[in-house]
Amino acid sequence: MQVQRVSPSAWYVEGVSALGTSANQNFISNAAFVVTADGVVVIDALGSPALAERLLAQIKTVTPKPVTHVLVTHYHADHIYGLQTFKAMGAKIVAHRAAKEYLNSETARLRMEASRQQLAPWVNDDTRLVHADQWIDGDTTLNLGGVEFQIKPVGPSHTPEDIAVYMPSEKVLFAGDLVFRSRIPYVGQADSRHWISAMETLLAFDAAVIVPGHGGLSTESRKDMQLTRDYLVYLRSTMGQAAQNLEPFEDAYAATDWTQFEHLPLFRVANRMNAYNTYLLLEHESKQ
């Protein structure tokens, strides 16, 4: 983990393009922080308490100021299992209210149970899910230490609770997992139709630099969002046609030309699952 400068007041750390494992401590996503007059505002908390401690060590190389707030772009494990470290320090957690349903779900419990086995010892019986101190519902502007943060809900997309965080003073957009760079996105149970339209919402910000949820910084927003967008559009087109024609998924998947994406990191791990979930989603959409 090495801190990289984003703008005069902002820095980030970049996770590896891999699945979360014990070997990488679940360091597979990005986190960022902004130094304000009063303290540090962190965007996402990484995928284990140990990673959050490492992030804190990186923050201390930049400033001795305490972390006052953590803004959570969404409640996927690789972004939130470090929250308890910041909470214990007294930081205020801010997230979208839609995350409450996930936090109280069987899915969240089972995911934590699996993570305790797959990511031990970094995620263990002491690791817990952390609720926000401030739940937001709509567009929200926070002035923290003299810095304006514009928070815009952009879900349901990658998750129901997606938010984007924009810092207009330095034209920095923290996009969460609406933007994946240089790797196959994780689609999961995403609303891919809204995800595609939400990317246009992100482009409406006058951002000079985007910190994605995964991958390196983007200074060419439309070009760098194109990979994620093209992939989602292709999934919907191919799997949607198969669902409409009542073609079995395995036959449709085997017949689809994946050439333009198969060279990307995590293609072999994630693509079949992404395609299957999109097939089910389009099957459901066709019945509405």
Image (spheres, rainbow, N blue to C red):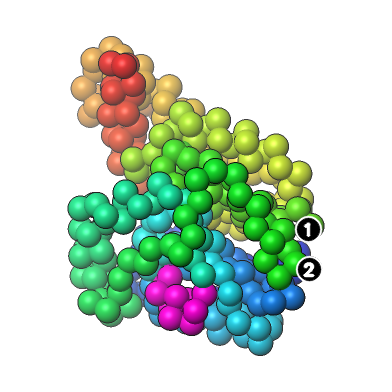
Q: Quadrant of residue 197?
A: top right
Residue placed under numbered mark 1 in the picture: 170
Residue 111 placement, left or right of 260: left
Q: Residues within 10 Å of mark 1 (few under 14, many from 20)?
A: some
Which of these two is toward me, 287 or 240? Answer: 287
* Magenta residue span: 82-91
Residue 209 placement, left or right of 162: right
Q: Residues within 10 Å of mark 2 (few under 14, many from 20)?
A: few
Residue 202 placement, left or right of 256: right
Quadrant of the snapshot with the N terminus = bottom right
* Residue contact at pointers 2 and 1, CB within 8 angstroms: yes
Which amino acid, by three-letter code, is at mark 2? Pro
> Residue 129's mark?
none
Residue extending farthest top: 245
Q: Secondary structure at mark 2?
A: loop
Residue 223 placement, left or right of 80: right
Residue 189 horizontal/vertical position (percent) = 33, 40
Quadrant of the snapshot with the C terminus = top left
Is residue 125 shown above or below 95?
A: below
Residue placed under numbered mark 2 in the picture: 8
Give whichever of discs 2 and 1 has the lower sequence position. Answer: 2
* Magenta span: chief secondary structure: helix
- The residue sitting at 49% across, 66% down in the picture is 93
Residue 223 seen in the figure? no
Residue 245 horizontal/vertical position (percent) = 28, 12
Residue 25 horizontal/vertical position (percent) = 38, 73
- The residue sitting at 38% across, 63% down in the picture is 131
Is residue 25 shown above or below 261?
A: below
- The residue sitting at 67% across, 66% down in the picture is 144
- The residue sitting at 62% across, 33% down in the picture is 200
Query: Is 1 a magenta residue?
Result: no
Q: Secondary structure at mark 1?
A: loop
